[in-house]
Image (cartoon, helix red, strand yellow):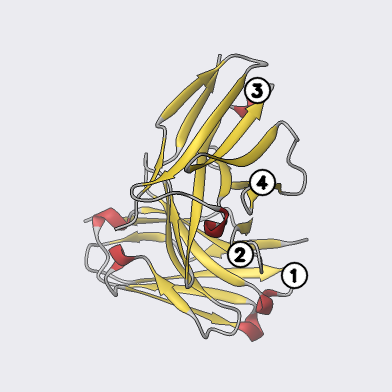
Amino acid sequence: QTVVTQEPSFSVSPGGTVTLTCGLSSGSVSTNYYPSWYQKTPGQAPRTLIHSTNTRSSGVPDRFSGSILGKKAALTITGAQADDESDYYCVLYMGSGFWVFGGGTKVTVL
Amino acid sequence: EVQLVESGGGLVKPGGSLILSCAASGFTFSTYTVAWVRQAPRKGLEWVSSISGGSSSISYADSLKGRFTVSRDIAKNSLYLRMSSLRVEDTAVYHCATAAPGTRAFDIWGQGTMVTVSS
């Protein structure tokens, strides 16, 4: 069974930088998995931040960026703001219409 | 306006059935793969099922073990999820979402409909 791993939580100071990662229980994440990132706040629909590893969705501020770092996909928030406090999820496309979400990372800005 | 609106959630007893609907508007629904994604209380997001634009490709998360059936009606711009043999652990908010051609990412999301499985 494929498991997508994310850090459970991160804390960042306002104006600071934080990098969240998205890995595989076995193997490396590459662009072939089309990693995407989503922001989820309680009671709201998920918001798509990044698709295809590093492409920002329409309207997403450029303080959010995606990349591959080593064997993992990564989401970096540069210049964190208070309203960036949220849960962040990565998703990997496994092929043939199958997706797997990571467990999510709770980001606290303080 | 581009949007997805889910409906059909509610309270159901363990072992019961429910059909969720997702109405699409503002875009060419027939060209998109669409998916169901759920979030149980205090848990993370979980991909449930997907169906391609022409319904030729359908997939389900392994954990569902054949209890859920996804379908779509192009003429009605609607997506459906028939859930049977429901379990307490199926309690969640169910979102529908489109997967944009080429990106393999979910881009348009609905607000979700709550399903509670409880005796």
Mark 3 vs 1: CB contact within 8 A = no
User: Which badge, 4 or 3, is on the more N-terminal residue?
Assistant: 4
Q: Secondary structure at mark 3?
A: loop
Image location (x, y in percent) of residue B107: 65, 57
Between the C-alphas of marks 1 and 4, the distance is: 25 Å
Relative to A29, say whether B108 is above or below: below
Q: Quadrant of residue A64?
A: top right
Mark 2 vs 1: CB contact within 8 A = yes
In front of the other: label 3 or label 2?
A: 3
Q: Residues within 10 Å of mark 3 (few under 14, many from 20)?
A: many
In this picture, residue B3 sits left or right of residue B34: right
What residue is disc 2 on? Answer: B98
Residue A80 has which mark?
A: 3
Q: Residues within 10 Å of mark 2 (few under 14, many from 20)?
A: many
Q: Secondary structure at mark 2?
A: strand
Between the C-alphas of marks 3 and 2, the distance is: 29 Å
Q: Kindly identify the amino acid type of the residue bearing the numbered disc 3.
A: Ala
Q: Looking at the picture, do discs 3 and 1 lie on one chain?
A: no
Residue lying at 37% horizontally and 42% vertically, measured from the top left? B43
Residue lying at 47% horizontally and 73% vertically, measured from the top left? A96
What is the chain identity of the residue bearing mark 3?
A: A
Image location (x, y in percent) of residue B5: 61, 62
The residue closer to the viewer here, B111 or A95, is A95
Between the C-alphas of marks 4 and 3, the distance is: 18 Å
Quadrant for the N terminus of chain A in the image: bottom left
Relative to A65, say whether A54 is above or below: below
Between the C-alphas of marks 2 and 1, the distance is: 11 Å
Residue B27 has which mark?
A: 1
Q: Secondary structure at mark 4?
A: loop
Between the C-alphas of marks 2 and 4, the distance is: 19 Å
Q: Kindly identify the amino acid type of the residue bearing the numbered disc 1.
A: Phe
Residue lying at 54% horizontally and 80% vertically, measured from the top left? B72
